[in-house]
Image (cartoon, rainbow, N blue to C red):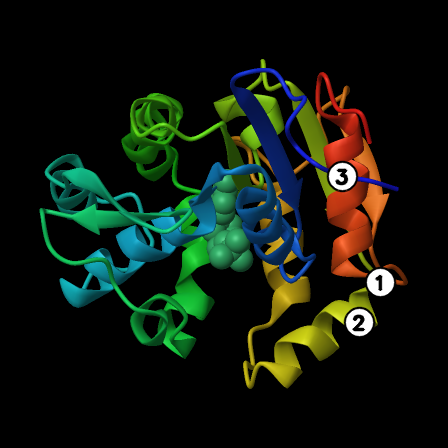
Amino acid sequence: MTNNCQTLKSFNVIAIDGGAASGKSSTSRRLAEKCNFLHVDTGSHYRAVTYACLEKGLEPRETSELKDVVRDLTFSTRICGHEAQICIAGDQPLGNGELRSPEVNAQVSPMSAIPLVREAVKTYQRQQVEVARLKGFSGIVMDGRDIGTVILPDADVKIFLKADPAKRQLRRQLEGSTDAIGDRDKRDASRATAPMKAADDAIIIDNSDISLEEVVDRIVALLPGSDA
Ligand code: DC
């Protein structure tokens, strides 16, 4: 299969959803490099907000203190290659040490289930489409849990990635992480606001037994105008 991105329409919007360690970020990153898209990892937005709240001693509960802190958060974007990184209050983007710490891993799912937290990042996330256009990218690939259903419901292509739970857990172990991905998935899929689910028009790809390149090739072949 040939997969050059030359024949694609001038600007493409791709939504990739799926559970923890389903390969969303690696797939999105590779797709972004291949087709000159901007990659937006929305999990990192919830992680950054969770980190900021934990720093202030706040737990993931809908209290007036949490409301005040979240309401005052301001977001901006720093672009590094094809990656859009969120900055809070004009600070440098947080590193993986902070975003993927055991504390953030444990609290990010309950924090992201709080409606006011989701509202706080929603506008920022949608604005990334314009950021990608203005910066001259050929499209945007945004990954998360509710991108195809809530954030970008008009995306050109929607993908929902799946993988065998044992393989997903192994991927995290190989990264040296103790993240309880099964628990997070259950929470993320059962919350009332914007639960993780495949959009009705999403293409489901199970990547348990296929390579990253093959997954990316399949997605490129789905893009409008693709000659793959
Ligand atoms: O993609 P990730 O594992 O880094 O995401 C961390 C958490 O953020 C995830 O458990 C649920 C939340 N999240 C969400 O609720 N909606 C998104 N679009 C992305 C992530």
For label 1, the residue is: 164
- The three-letter amino acid code for the residue at tag 3 is Asn
The answer to which image quadrant residue 202 occupies is top right
Q: How far apart are marks 2 and 1 (CA)?
A: 5 Å
Near-viewer residue (223 or 176): 223
Q: Is mark 1 on a helix, strand or loop?
A: loop
For label 2, the residue is: 167
Q: Mark 3 or mark 1, which has the lower sequence index?
A: 3
Q: Residue at x 63, y 75 (%)?
A: 172
Near-viewer residue (178 or 63): 178
Label 3 close to label 1 by CB (< 8 Å): no
Mark drawn on residue 3: 3
Q: In this view, does 202 lie to the left or right of 119?
A: right
Q: How crowded is mark 1: few (under 14 residues within 10 Å), some or many (20 or more)?
A: few
Mark drawn on residue 223: none
The answer to which image quadrant residue 101 occupies is bottom left
Near-viewer residue (68 or 203): 203
Q: Is mark 2 on a helix, strand or loop?
A: helix
Q: Does the residue labelled 1 lie within 8 Å of ligand 1?
A: no
Q: Mark 2 or mark 3, which has the lower sequence index?
A: 3
